[in-house]
Image: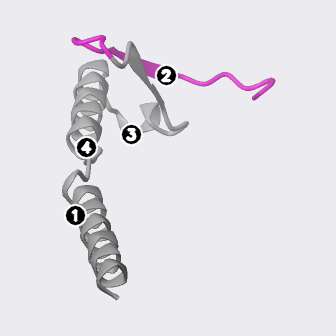
Amino acid sequence: MVKGTARQVVVVKSPDQKLFEQAIFLLREDAQEQGVGERELLEEARRLADQCLRHTPAKKRRVLPPLFWMATGAILVGIVWLITAIV
């Protein structure tokens, strides 16, 4: 928690609120000194929010390897049963 400090923020609301309601960007203290306007700040915040959403890796489900190992184990158990039944 920050006490005794006033910070300026840019809040970007999400158009699709399934997962996120809004993104909050904290402005640097020297942002206003650089002559950046409000419109440029909002455009940059939206661009950064879009970029973050595009670069988020999707969680991949690996179905093939568990099924492969399950089948391999079943085949090996079957072979062991056959060998012990013959002997």
Magenta stretch holds residue 14: yes
Instruction: For mark 1, give the secondary structure.
Output: helix
Q: Which residue is mark 3?
A: 34
Label 4 vs label 1: CA separation? 23 Å
- Write the residue at 29% across / 58% down: 66
Q: Which residue is mark 2?
A: 9
Label 4 vs label 2: CA separation? 29 Å
Name above or below for residue 82 compared with residue 50: below
Disc 1 to disc 2: CB gap under 8 Å: no
Of all residues, the one furthest to the bottom in this rendering is: 87
The disc label shown at residue 68, or none: 1
- Residue 12 lies, in percent from the top left, at 34, 17
Q: Left or right of 46: which side holds 10? A: right
Disc 3 to disc 2: CB gap under 8 Å: no
Magenta stretch holds residue 62: no
- Write the residue at 24% across / 46% down: 55
Q: Quarter of the image containing the N terminus?
A: top right
Q: Quarter of the image containing the C terminus?
A: bottom left
Residue type at mark 2: give it.
Answer: Val
Residue count near mark 3 (Cα–Cα under 10 Å), binned few <14, some 14–19, many ≥20: few
Observer-nearest of 31 and 1: 1
Instruction: For mark 2, give the secondary structure.
Output: strand
- Residue 27 lies, in percent from the top left, at 48, 32
**Badge 4 or badge 1: first in the primary sequence:** 4
Q: Which residue is mark 4?
A: 58
